[in-house]
Image (cartoon, helix red, strand yellow):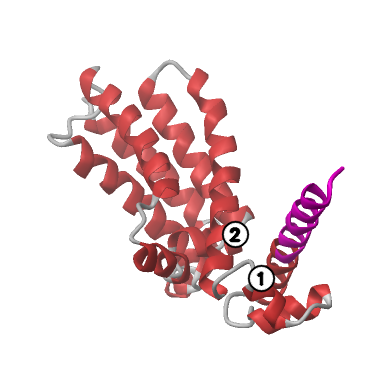
Amino acid sequence: MGINERKEREKEVLQKSILTAAREVFLEKGFDQTSIRSIAQRIEYSPTTIYLYYKDKDAILYALHTEGFYLLGSKMEVLNSVENPLERVKAMGRVYIQFAMEHPDYYDLMFVQKSPMNKLDEDHDVWKEGQTTFDGLKFTVHQCMEQGYLRFSDVEAGSYLLWATLHGMCNLYDRGRCKVLDEEKSEQIVDLAFAEFLKMLDAFGN
């Protein structure tokens, strides 16, 4: 192995170490307590070293947010084999909610925190991770419309409505806004609401 190849490999190893440390700090302490300094301390490097690889905290959190989308995408991909588009939409909803419940920190970065989007705004990039996920939903919703399962007049608006509904359910629960609900139902409210949501989908096509 040549000197240049060795240097490139060392850079890749360090970059992965930075991202691993950032993930650990974020999952342990949350968004507010994650900083360049806390990440540097975890890998026992100076903050200056971190800046050689990532411009700022937003860039690091964007990389973590991308990891979250890869994870969600891998769970959604297995649903491609579901032939009935309405059943696929329902399954996508279940996967989305399950992901939000099992990975609240990733979900927070992907769909709530502004930080990852700050990087996109600065670099004038397209949000390709979100676009890919939303395009998958639109494709299935369009099939539902073609086959008469959903009577939306606009696939973009209909897909956004489904996404916003599920996001609202997950975010209200995660942010502790379900305390206004019946105490006996508050812990199961997302599952209960999703069951009602599925009934609405079934009725919408009839």
Q: Residues within 10 Å of mark 2 (few under 14, many from 20)?
A: many
Amino acid under label 2? Answer: Leu
Element marked by disc 1: helix
- Quarter of the image with the N terminus is top right
The answer to whether 74 appears left or right of 197 in the picture is: right
Q: Are marks 1 and 2 in contact (CB under 8 Å)?
A: yes
Looking at the rendered structure, the kind of residue marked 1 is: Phe
- From the viewer's side, name the closer residue of 50 and 158: 50
Q: Is residue 147 left or right of residue 41?
A: left
Relative placement, left or right, of 104 versus 82 is right
Query: Mark number for residue 26?
Result: 1
The residue positioned farthest toward the left in the image shown: 153
For image coordinates 45% across by 40% down, the residue present is 93
Q: Nearer the viewer, residue 65 or 170?
A: 65
Query: Residue at left 51%, top 71%?
Result: 58
Please tell me whether residue 117 is drawn above or below residue 154 in the rendered image: below
Please provide the residue range marked out in magenta.
1-18
Numbered mark located on residue 132 in the image:
none
Reply above or below: 19 against 42.
above
- In the rendered view, would you say 24 is above or below 68? below
Q: Quadrant of residue 131?
A: top left
x and y, in percent, of residue 98 in the image: 57, 47
Q: Residue at x 42, y 74 (%)?
A: 180
Q: Where does residue 74 sit, x and y in percent of width and height? A: 59, 36
**Magenta stretch: dominant SS?**
helix
> Circle 2 — which element?
helix
Percent of width and height locating residue 188: 54, 56
The residue wearing badge 2 is 64
The relative height of residue 28 versus residue 96 in the rendered view (above or below) is below
Q: Position of residue 3 (x, y in %)?
A: 83, 52
